[in-house]
Image (cartoon, grey):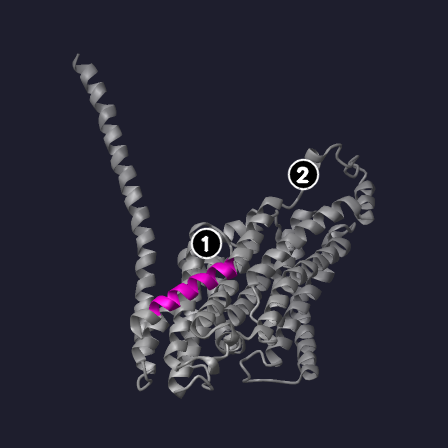
Amino acid sequence: MANSQVQLRKPTLDKDLEKLTFTEQATHFVLRSWTGVGIALIFLLIAMAVASTFATGTPGVLVVAVAAALAAYMAMNIGANDVTNNVGAAVGARAMSMGVALVIAAIFEIAGALLAGQGVAETVASGIVDRAIFPSPVVFAWAMMAALISAALWINIATIANAPISTTHSIIGGVIGAGAAASGFQSVQWDAIAVIVVSWTVSPILGGVIAAAFLYFIKEFIIYRDDKIEAAKTWVPVLVAVMAGAFAAFLANGGTNGFYDLPLGKALLVGLGFGIATYVIARPIVRRAAEGLDNRNQSLRVLFRLPLICSAALLSFAHGANDVSNAVGPLYGIVSTLRSGDTGGGVVIPLWVMLIGAFGISLGLLLFGPRLIRIVGNEITKLNPMRAFCVALSSAVAVLTASALAIPVSSTHIAVGAVFGVGLFREWYTRNSQRRIDYIRSRGNGIAPEEPPANLDETRRRYLVRRSHFMTIISAWIVTLPVSAMLSALIFLALNALFT
């Protein structure tokens, strides 16, 4: 009987210990999640303190401080939702760990925002609505604050729902809605909106086409070659050189906030020179990495890992240059309007404004970004380092082009468009490439090209792109602008009624 009691007590004790262990683990999880919220709140307070310090003497300094906190909140939401597109492909291809991806993205987001972000920020601040039509600088300030609140709330909701929406759609919808509520639809500069909307339509298609073109080149000249390692040693340095040269040309042609601005012809020469220098450096590095590798596709993943990391860093720079405007554009509009005493603006964007946006985006990514990285990197189509390199490089080229033109495009559009472009191209290439068919037959391993499926269900099963994600993402894009606009209009009316 005693032994029986001992045996009964022991499992009861074990169960109690297991409950305590589970409770401890749950507590750690909750505390970890609340730690992120606490750090975010501290950053908001720092943003307010910085704004109060540097905006001393500006009329309505309290309004500027609150607007700085809202811009910081918006920037963190952009980091949590939007920056995932930059490194999602690289993480999905397992070229880098989540931690390395977060650090690289954070560093290059800050660099892009500070070095090349002013042009697009000025467009968001003064190119969407005509400030001269607003009744007063205060009314314009309330409108910009309403835009920030509505856009940040909508992005926050989307992030919680794991939906990679467009933060550019959100803020431009917010500016349009608040501007229309403040001074009528005549304040909206519809010609500028038309250009931006056209860019939203063209940019994802452009990203997909460029990505598919790069993938076609890689398949034709590297993957489906008898000696693919030798082919990779020839062409991988060329691809890296093209990437570096394009980036150098962008920086030389006004890509540093006007600090260094060469004419396009000279900038292209700078890019060419930088590309040649990069090729000379990359060629021996790739050859050393290729030593001892077997002649198979798995070995190519090793050779494409470094180019993929570089392209992800370049895309993060491009995103910082373009999308920091979504956070700091309205704040810059408020600061410039209140300082100048009218709605004409004309104040150069202060460095402290850009710092709030740059560090806010990086902090939001580090604290809240990993969940959406997995969605973009894994759930639309299967990515390996070669495909992910095509996605990142094509997205960076498209975003940098838009930044050079001071057009606020959606990096989400472009990155997701590139992912779909790669997946759809793979479907076409798998069925139609004669080089692939000849390559498979030449291996002498008895593997024949795939026969066409016998029925529609089998066709859908073999799709390399998940169509359901396409419709979900398109739906999110369509509703974002009108929802942000309506929400922003309501918030402006509430603010205007309470404080004026």
Q: Does the magenta stretch include residue 109?
A: no
Specify the segment rendered in magenta: 480-495
| Residue position for label 2 | 460
| Three-letter amino acid code of the residue under disc 1 | Ala
Q: Nearer the viewer, residue 247 or 13?
A: 247
Examine the rendered structure and indicate whether residue 162 appears above or below residue 186: above
Q: Which residue is labeled 1 in the image? A: 158
Q: What main secondary structure does the magenta stretch of the protein show? A: helix
Is the residue marked by circle 2 packed among few (<14), some (14-19), or many (20+) residues within 10 Å?
A: few
Left or right, 178 with respect to 240, comes to: left
Place of residue 337 in the rendered image (x, y in percent of width and height, measured from the top left): 41, 82
Q: Residue 197, position in %: x, y?
A: 60, 66
Q: Which residue is drawn at 79% across and 37% down?
A: 448
Q: In which quarter of the image is residue 359?
A: bottom left
Element type at mark 2: helix
Q: In which quarter of the image is the C terminus?
A: bottom left
| Residue 238 in sight here | yes
The quadrant in which residue 388 appears is bottom right
